[in-house]
Image (tube, rainbow, N blue to C red):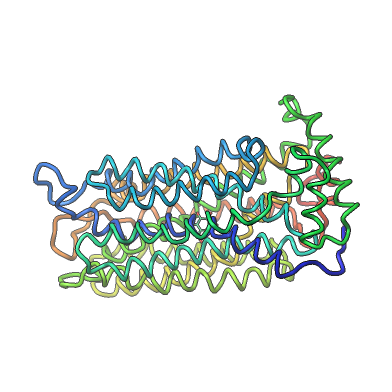
């Protein structure tokens, strides 16, 4: 383990904070749709053939196309960040975010909305891979964990900010255009900020020579500079050897690491987090919030605010606990809490007929319980684990594969939530009296069952990485021992 006595704290925090605007945009642009959707689905300009509302499948596509774009973005990130450099890629996606925000705000048809949401999605996918990579490669070793976690915090801040913005424009005519346009501000901050930041020592060494890498290490105040430079050189050599030979994937030690990364990302999404992040105002509307009110949209978005806030708050708690309690206790606690909340949601919606008004509060309380349990567990820990478990030789490949699985699974959830409710439990009357809404009860039960399977997966397969250096973890995997025995 490399220990640094002092480093250039202010500069390093500035770097992490500016780059984390990429995480903030990831959160903002995925969260903003939750409130925007309520206005979009009823906007007469977007409706065709006198339909009363956009069909659910169309709504699901508007929400989930971004996530599909992110999967594509994540897949290509490894290569483009190696070719162009981390800094250039972050500047390019900042411009894509900016142009996308304007494009979305100006969209005048469902097709244009879907195209711009797809483009923004690609930028989100690239950001979700590149920001943690950029921060970790620029961080002095002993503060890397905390600095990388700033990214997850930024994601939750972005989601919360998007809920605030949604609320602010809920009562404005065509308010959804303004909601999207606000994304322009963080995009410009990222573009301008990144312009003044350096690329990473790791990339500079591989592409521009040792002198440049050395200069940046001096700037961040890495006190073990020579050791770090040596390590970078060795890793680059190792990777060059591994490059092009996909046969490395057949090695016995590779499989467990891949299963952990893919499994934890699958679980992070199939526990249903994004039905709450993307659809919470829709769920609140189904539960009766805003029914028969002139302020219906506002009243359905309002209860989402505490959800966004609690998410931020408990991500901070997680950053504090993760190196003290360890990853596995937090995962157990989080999963148990989420399973209970999901069952309550499932029961509430399934028995909505006999519950009446009470459904509103059951749904609100269950969701406000669900979120902190996610935020202390699968939220940050899934991303953390994928940055820890891969031996250097397959780190890039493993991380981009896991990131892609994250977005792919997210797409399946976001794209089926409304329909799944319909298939499993039938339709329920819309409390606002405008036709029928779907009943999501069955979907929540499915996520609860996945949570139970997740408990077994964590118990039997996830290693406790707390307190182990990356070298130690790598050695454990290379020796072919079972991950749980770490
Ligand atoms: C997940 C996102 C989710 C967010 C919520 C992230 O870790 O990857 O899908 O929307 O947490 O805070």
Instruction: Give the quarter of the image for residue 380.
Output: bottom right
Q: Is residue 300 visible?
A: yes
Front position in the image: 433 or 445: 433
Instruction: Give the quarter of the image for residue 285.
Output: bottom left
Q: Is residue 285 above or below residue 473?
A: below
Q: Position of residue 386 (x, y in %)?
A: 67, 49
Q: Position of residue 283 (x, y in %)?
A: 32, 62
Front position in the image: 179 or 199: 199
Relative side of 64 to 55, left or right: right
Q: Residue at x 15, y 72 (%)?
A: 294
Q: Position of residue 224 (x, y in %)?
A: 88, 58
Relative side of 270 to 142, left or right: left
Q: Is residue 448 visible?
A: no
Relative side of 438 to 127, left or right: left
Judged from this view, the residue extending furthest toward the left is 50
Q: Position of residue 196 (x, y in %)?
A: 62, 56
Q: Is residue 257 above or below residue 153?
A: above
Q: Is residue 65 above or below residue 17?
A: above
State the quadrant of the N terminus.
Answer: bottom right
Q: Residue at x 74, y 69 (%)?
A: 9
Relative side of 83 to 163, left or right: right
């Amino acid at each position: 383990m490399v220990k640094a006595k002092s480093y250039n704290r202010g500069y390093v925090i500035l770097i992490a904070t500016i780059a984390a605007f990429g995480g903030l945009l990831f959160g903002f642009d995925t969260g903003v749709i939750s409130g925007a959707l309520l206005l979009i689905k009823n906007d007469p300009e977007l409706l065709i053939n006198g339909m009363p509302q956009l069909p659910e499948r169309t709504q699901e596509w508007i929400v989930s196309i971004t996530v599909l774009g992110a999967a594509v973005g994540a897949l290509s990130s490894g290569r483009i960040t190696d070719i162009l450099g981390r800094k250039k890629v972050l500047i390019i996606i900042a411009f894509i975010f900016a142009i996308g925000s304007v494009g979305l705000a100006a969209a005048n048809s469902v097709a244009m909305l879907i195209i711009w949401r797809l483009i923004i999605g690609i930028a989100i996918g690239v950001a979700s891979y590149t920001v943690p990579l950029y921060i970790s490669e620029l961080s002095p070793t002993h503060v890397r964990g905390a600095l990388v976690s700033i990214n997850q915090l930024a994601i939750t801040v972005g989601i919360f900010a998007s809920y605030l913005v949604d609320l602010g424009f809920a009562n404005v005519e065509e308010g959804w255009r303004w909601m999207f346009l606000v994304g322009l501000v963080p995009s410009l901050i990222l573009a301008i900020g990144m312009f003044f930041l350096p690329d990473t020592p790791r990339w500079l060494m591989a592409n521009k020579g040792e002198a440049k890498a050395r200069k940046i290490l001096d700037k961040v105040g890495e006190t073990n500079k020579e050791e770090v430079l040596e390590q970078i050189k060795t890793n680059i050599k190792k990777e060059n050897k591994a490059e092009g030979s996909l046969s490395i994937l057949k090695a016995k030690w590779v499989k467990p690491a891949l299963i952990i990364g893919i499994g934890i990302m699958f679980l992070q999404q199939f526990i249903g987090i994004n039905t709450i992040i993307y659809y919470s105002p829709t769920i609140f509307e189904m539960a009766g919030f805003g029914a028969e009110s002139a302020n219906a949209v506002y009243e359905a978005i309002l209860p989402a605010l505490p959800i966004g806030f609690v998410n931020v708050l408990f991500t901070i708690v997680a950053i504090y606990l993760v190196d003290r309690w360890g990853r596995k206790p937090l995962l157990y606690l989080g999963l148990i809490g989420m399973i209970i909340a999901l069952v309550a949601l499932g029961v509430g919606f399934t028995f909505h007929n006999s519950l009446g008004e009470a459904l509103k509060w059951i749904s609100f309380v269950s969701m406000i319980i669900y979120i902190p349990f996610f935020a202390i567990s699968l939220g940050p820990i899934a991303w953390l684990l994928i940055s820890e478990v891969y031996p250097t030789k397959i780190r890039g490949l493993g991380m981009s594969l896991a990131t892609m699985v994250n977005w792919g699974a997210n797409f399946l959830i976001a794209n089926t939530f409304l329909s799944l409710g319909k298939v499993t439990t039938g339709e329920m009357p819309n409390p606002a009296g405008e036709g029928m809404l779907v009943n999501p009860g069955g979907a929540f039960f499915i996520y609860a069952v996945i949570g139970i399977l997740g408990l077994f997966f964590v118990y039997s397969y996830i290693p406790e990485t707390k307190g182990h250096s990356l070298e130690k973890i790598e050695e454990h995997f290379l020796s072919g021992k079972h991950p749980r025995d770490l």
